[in-house]
Amino acid sequence: MSQPKYRKIIEGAEALSLGISIVVAILIGVGLGYWLRNLFGQGWLLWVGVFIGVAAAILNVYKAYQKQKKEFEELAKDPRYKNYYEEEE
């Protein structure tokens, strides 16, 4: 079975989307903190927003790691990728 024509492009887009999601999560957190700071007049609320954004970015990286780990575990079960040089008894 042949692979899809645009497989490399799709894989590249998935890798790029992780970087974009990190930046967007942090920007949304900073925006939320800025909005809360202006709404309530408390300067520390900006840092709460920054913390929320960084936490969301870390969560995105963790989810991507778990997805990759699951895909690699599935590949390890594939007979094409098993180690054929097992130790002899």
Image (cartoon, rainbow, N blue to C red):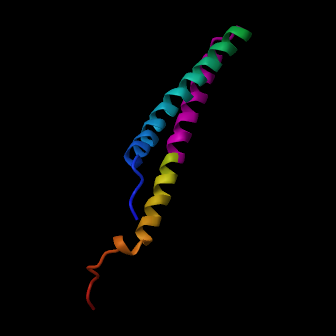
Q: Residue at x 42, y 41 (%)?
A: 15
Q: Residue at x 47, y 65 (%)?
A: 74
Looking at the rendering, the stretch of residues picked out in magenta corresponds to 41-63
Q: Position of residue 36 (x, y in %)?
A: 69, 15
Count the marks: how many? 0
x 51%, y 53%: residue: 67
Residue reaching furthest right?
40
Examine the structure image and report whether residue 50 is included in the region drawn in magenta. Answer: yes
User: Which quadrant does the N terminus fall into?
Assistant: bottom left
Q: In this rendered view, identify the residue nearer to me: 28 or 39.
A: 28
Q: Up-down: is 73 above or below 22? A: below
Residue drawn at (49%, 27%) of the image: 23
Tell me where residue 38 appears, x and y as whole percent.
Answer: 68, 8
Splitting the image into 4 quarters, where does residue 84 fall?
bottom left
Q: Is residue 34 above or below residue 15?
A: above
Q: Is residue 73 magenta?
A: no
**Magenta residues, dominant SS class:** helix
In the image, farthest residue toward the bottom: 89
Looking at the picture, tell me which residue is in the foreground, 10 or 73.
10
**The C terminus lies in quadrant:** bottom left
Pick the front one: 43 or 39: 39
Q: Is residue 67 above or below residue 86?
A: above
Above or below, 56 against 69 in this view is above
Residue 78 coordinates in the image, percent (x, y): 42, 71
Q: Going by the image, does 62 lie left or right of 2?
A: right
